[in-house]
Amino acid sequence: MVRLELVGGGRMGEALLAGLLEAGWAEPGECCVVERLAARREELIGRFPGVRVVDEVVPADGAVLAVKPGDVPVAGAALAAAGVGRVLSIAAGVSTQALERVLGAGVPVVRAMPNTPALVRCGAAAVAAGAAAAEEDLAWAESILGAVGVVVRVQESQLDAVTGLSGSGPAYVMLVAEALIEGGVLVGLPRDVATTLAVETLLGSARLLHATGEHPAALREAVTSPGGTTAAGLRQLEERAVRAAVLGAVEASARRARELGS
């Protein structure tokens, strides 16, 4: 019996495995990846020497369910048949109740919403406990997701809101990055220069916000001189309702997550 089984060898499953091994959470021989595609199995075998990569579920102390929502019933039934000890699910929109029906009564289930920056160990994830999950199960789930970023606990009813904010949030940030780059090109910068400046501005601003712990409004005010260049730019953003658009994007994403879940 392996210590941890990742069901689904996609980008998120790969990121979790890499983070866990790098952090020393487990040894390669204690981990197993279940991946149906032969070509992908070969890729994973090449990247993670010593990790068992198979095409069918095997018995495990715990499993991470990292498959598409439509594949959950089959994958969950296979885990139940193998006698898995507990499950952390990152399958979008699949409730803990639905998972528990597939896995069987008494199997601890923790549901999570991670995001794509986990691929570079900068993820932001939220976890919620199912009916049979105890404190130790939540701590176990946090230890896995914590290898690739930060983790917060929420009620399951709040996971749709998490989807709207941090789950979909990277796409909003990428859109802003695109706009900044195009803006730089518009005012005369070479595209490579505009790209470097935009990326580093986003990265530096996030680090500043994280390091200082100050409210974003305070940091915005610190760089906005009366009648200055930043004030002129901010006026354009407010006139075009950028703030309202971001609020609407988070709300729309959360609403769609609820719809998909139902």
Image (cartoon, rainbow, N blue to C red):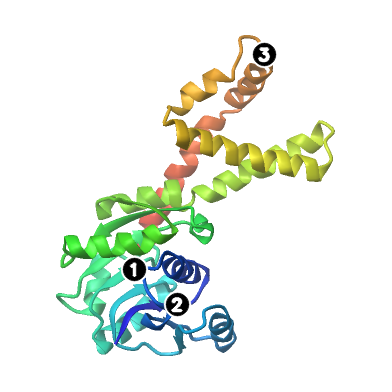
Residue 29 visible to the viewer: yes
Image position, residue 67 (x, y; %): 43, 74
Residue 262 visible to the viewer: no
Asked if disc 3 and disc 1 are in contact, CB closer than 8 Å, the reply is no
Gap between marks 3 and 1, in whole Å?
49 Å
Q: Nearer the viewer, residue 137 or 107?
A: 137
Q: Of the residues under marks 1 and 2, which one precedes in the sequence?
A: 2
Residue placed under numbered mark 2 in the picture? 8
Q: What label sits on residue 89 in the rendered view?
A: 1
Q: Is residue 50 left or right of residue 141?
A: right
Residue placed under numbered mark 3 in the picture? 228
Report the residue at 41% width, 52% height from top. 163
Report the residue at 50% width, 47% height from top. 169
In the rendered view, would you say 29 is above or below 223?
below
Q: Is residue 32 left or right of residue 153?
A: right
The quadrant of the rendering that contains the C terminus is: bottom left
Q: Of the residues under marks 3 and 1, which one precedes in the sequence?
A: 1
Which quarter of the picture shows residue 28? Answer: bottom left
